[in-house]
Image: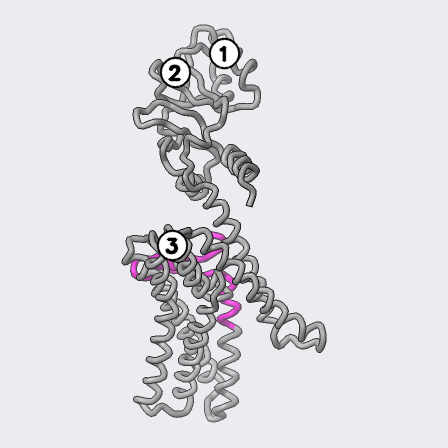
Amino acid sequence: MNGTIRVGNLFGIPFYIHPSWFLVLGLVTWSYSSGLAAQFPQLAGGLALLLGLLTALLLFSSVVAHELGHSFAAIRQGIDVKSITLFIFGGLASLEKESKTPGEAFWVAIAGPLVSLLLFSLFTALGFATAASGALAAILGVLASVNLALALFNLIPGLPLDGGNILKAIVWKVTGNPYKGVVFASRVGQIFGWVAIASGLVPLLLFGSFGNFWNALVGFFLLQNAGNAAQFARVQERLTGLTAADAVTSDSPIVSATLTLREFADERILNWQNWHRFLVTDDNGQLVGAISINDLRTIPTTLWSETQIKEIMRPVEDFTTVKSDQPLLEVVKLLEQGKLSALAVIRDNGVLVGILEKASIINLLEKRAQANPA
């Protein structure tokens, strides 16, 4: 999963760690252990390092709790959570699908910051209630302040941050169009991304200071992800209202099961020179299998005139099918998740409509874009 390491499950949700997280863990541990050692000289070097590691793990646990907030809100809406991943910039809960209404989308987005604010209140209250002092007070103070910062940072109203998803839900509610909400929130996210990049690069260029360089990295992250979200939203909007049948490849490679291999070879040369795999139908037009050019090599050419396709075709179970009225957006997700290059499109009665390829979807989107330019 993009180089990530699976370390188990959290409440049934697959939990992954990106290798970049270990770098941040080491830096945070070193930073806080050094701070504790300087603030409390009585701490032995090993104890300060151990407390620094404990603080770092608690901070990352706060990030996980933040993502669990999003996850539990999504699960309450019947949305599966595919995974939670920790990486260099924090955490990410990957949801199976979007919320159905702007109100539901709002609650999924706000749930994470609410958890962070709750943890801020909890750690602050623990500090007062226990009259903590020394290293314990310092650690509780760090945990409280970081959770507050995590909540406030994520409430910045630009994608891919939680505030951007909240803004998306608000625009969706006002316009009735979820994709307009994504595009608007993405543009705001890009603005914040450029501001963060400038705040990191300007001091570096003018004064040679690397103090704000982390801002530039965060800005690049915001800029890239906001742009990707806007682009994906535009594609989704163009796919809305389309079905699998709309993207079927014209002149799909379909042959009858009763054709002889000789007839098949001649027909391919005349009509489908560029195709190497073909769908096979019976006399009723129903999909019964598939055959490739390589399958012909298993039969001597002297037997081609007396051997029918149905005798060497592969069963239909080897080819993924979708219904002709299935939304094209769902079909695209199926292609991506299954890493498939093509699907067979059939009607409810099993009659084959044709083959659907990624290229045919792209061509369809291009035609719609030309007919309805933004």
- The residue pinned by badge 1 equals 300
Q: Is residue 179 above or below residue 305?
A: below
The location of residue 331, given as percent across then percent down, is: 41, 38
Q: Residue at x 50, y 54 (%)?
A: 183
Q: Is residue 23 above or below residue 135?
A: above
Q: How many neighbours does mark 1 have within 10 angstroms: few (below 14), some (14-19), or many (20 or more)?
A: few
State the residue in front, 290 or 321: 321
Badge 3 or badge 1: first in the primary sequence:
3
Q: Is residue 264 magenta?
A: no
Q: Secondary structure at mark 3?
A: strand
- The residue pinned by badge 2 equals 310
- The residue pinned by badge 3 equals 95
Badge 3 or badge 2: first in the primary sequence:
3
The location of residue 144, given as percent across then percent down, is: 40, 80
Q: Residue at x 55, y 66 (%)?
A: 192
The location of residue 136, given as percent across then percent down, is: 39, 87
Q: Secondary structure at mark 2?
A: helix
Q: How many neighbours does mark 3 have within 10 angstroms: few (below 14), some (14-19), or many (20 or more)?
A: some
214 left or right, relative to 343: right
Can residue 249 be seen from the camera position used here?
Answer: yes
Which image quarter: residue 81?
A: bottom left
Magenta stretch?
A: 1-26
- Rounded to the nearest whole Å, what is the CA distance between mark 3 and mark 2? 43 Å
Residue type, mark 1 in image? Pro
State the residue in front, 255 or 149: 149
Foreground tag (2 vs 1): 2
Question: Looking at the image, do the residues carrying marks 2 and 1 touch, with CB atoms under 8 Å apart?
Answer: no
Q: Secondary structure at mark 1?
A: loop
